Amino acid sequence: MKIALVRHGQTEGNFTGRVQGRQNNELNDTGRRQCEKLKVKIKDKHFDYCYMSPLLRTVETAMILVGDRVETIPDKRLLERDLGELEGAEKELYDPVKYWNFDTNCGDLRVETIQDIYERCRSFLEYIKEKHAGQDILVVTHAAIYRMLRLLLLNKEVKGDLYDGFIENCAYEEFEVE
């Protein structure tokens, strides 16, 4: 089975350096162009299903990429991290070292804990592997969920600091899964 991950295209919040979390923002023109470019790149790829976060920016990304050729399924486990009081704030107020440490599992300011994200992503992958064994799945989601799904798909040890850098808008990676 193959699982491909995509982070949604750019939004105004991404462009202006705001932490979006679960704000329901649509793509901006740059984000739509990013999606069109990725659509061309993956046009010959086969996907049996496309799972996506139900937020506008991921739904729009999925529709541009495969909406005309693959069944799309919203899944709340793919929602972006709930950033609590930090939603809409400048990115400098969000400390990835603090909020991405699996051992300290910080949830102050009502930020969803990293262990809760881990559990959502683990549950989603177990479901996909069981329901779609032998099929190819496209997953359109957000940076935090993309990052955690990648860690799980690579069978990385989930402990300590899990932040592994910035994920570009419309990033795309494929993983072979047994």
Image (spheres, grey):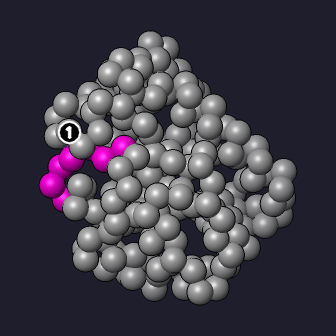
Residue 100 position, x and y percent, is 40, 27
* Left or right: 156, with 132 as reference point: left
Image quarter for residue 116?
top right
Residue 176 vertical position relative to residue 147 in the rendered view, above or below: below
Graded by Cα atoms within 10 Å as few (under 14), some (14 to 19) or many (20 or more), the crowding at tag 1 reads some
Closer to the camera in the image, 116 or 85:
85
Residue at horizontal 54 percent and vertical 34 percent from the top = 117
Type of amino acid under label 1: Ala
Q: Is residue 114 left or right of residue 127?
A: left
Residue in view at x 36 percent, y 18 percent: 108
Q: In terms of depth relative to the viewer, which is nearer, 148 or 25?
A: 25
**Region of the chain picked out in magenta, as a range:** 15-21
Q: How many marks?
A: 1
Q: From where the camera sits, is residue 44 visible?
A: no
**What residue is shown at x 38% (from left), y 81% (from top)?**
37
Q: Compared with residue 87, is residue 12 higher up or lower down, i.e. above or below?
A: below
Image coordinates of residue 163 in percent, x first then y, are: 39, 33
Residue under numbered circle 1: 89
Q: Magenta stretch mostly in which secondary structure?
A: loop
Residue at 45 percent of width and 29 percent of height: 112
Q: Position of residue 70 (x, y in %)?
A: 66, 79
Query: Within the magenta stretch, is there residue 130?
Result: no
Q: Which quadrant: the N terminus?
A: bottom right
> SS of the residue at dot 1?
loop
Residue 17 within the magenta-colored segment of the rendering: yes
- Vertical position of residue 12 compared to residue 151: above or below: below
Q: Inspect this view and state whether residue 30 appears.
A: yes
Horizontal and vertical percent position of residue 96: 31, 30
Against 115, residue 117 (above or below) is below
Residue occupying the far top of the picture: 104
Q: Is residue 27 left or right of residue 152?
A: left
